Image: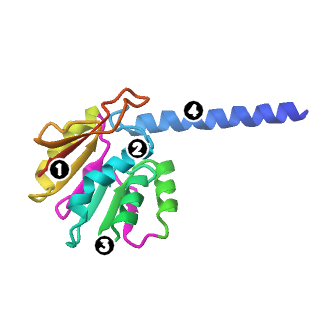
Amino acid sequence: MSVFDVCSFILILIAVIFEYYYIYTFIKSKKGKYPPFVPTKKTVLNEINNTAAPFLSLQEHKNIVEPGCGDARILKMLADAYPLHSYIGYEWDYVPYFLARFKTRKYKNVKIERKNFMLADYTAVGLVVLFAGTEIAQDLSVKLKQDLPAGAIIISESFRLPNFNCIQEVGTGKKNRFFLEPKLYVYQA
């Protein structure tokens, strides 16, 4: 066997593993109902931070939740800026879950749970930051409407929540690679 054959075999093996992973996550996500792991861009992170600032700058302790937290970059950014609060990220997919756990391992106020966010309890949450996807937005909107306490804030990246009245829209720049609306939608429960 030549070096070329070994390299080819390794590349094919990696391709098969990735293909299996994508098929597995597609099936596990209820055939695409839950959005895939898409890292949030730096410009959008800054806008989320700016939008959450008036709410999180208060000295009152808040529980902040990110359903479908991916690699936890939003939670990590907010925890750095506002360490007084508690942060919880829910992620069902193994790869982003382990990335999130690794990236937040030194944060005492950040907890990552491998869990379906539709089964989570939102009754003690002060802020929800999410990237929901069109299909899940309807179900999640109903869940949040039932669970969230009055006055809780929701910041939704690119997707509107049908059961809430938008109190603020914040532009985040040009459309992203998925041609989604470059906006944050802010709601109050």
Q: Are marks 3 and 1 in contact (CB under 8 Å)?
A: no
Q: CA distance from mark 2 to mark 1?
A: 27 Å
Q: Is residue 168 above or below residue 102?
A: above
Q: Relative to 52, is 40 on the left or the right?
A: right
Q: Name the residue type under label 1.
A: Leu
Earlier in the chain: of badge 3 and badge 1, it is 3
Over which residues does the magenta segment extend? 107-133
Residue in the image at 72% along x and 34% along y: 11
In terms of secondary structure, where does tag 1 sit?
helix
Disc 4 target residue: 19
> Do the residues bearing badges 4 and 2 touch, measured as CB atoms within 8 Å?
no
Q: Residues within 10 Å of mark 1 (few under 14, many from 20)?
A: many
Front label number (2 vs 1):
2
From the image, state whether disc 3 or disc 1 is nearer to you. Answer: 3
Return the residue found at the far top.
179
User: Mark on residue 84?
Assistant: 3
Residue 175 lies, in percent from the top left, at: 37, 29
Which structural element holds mark 4?
helix
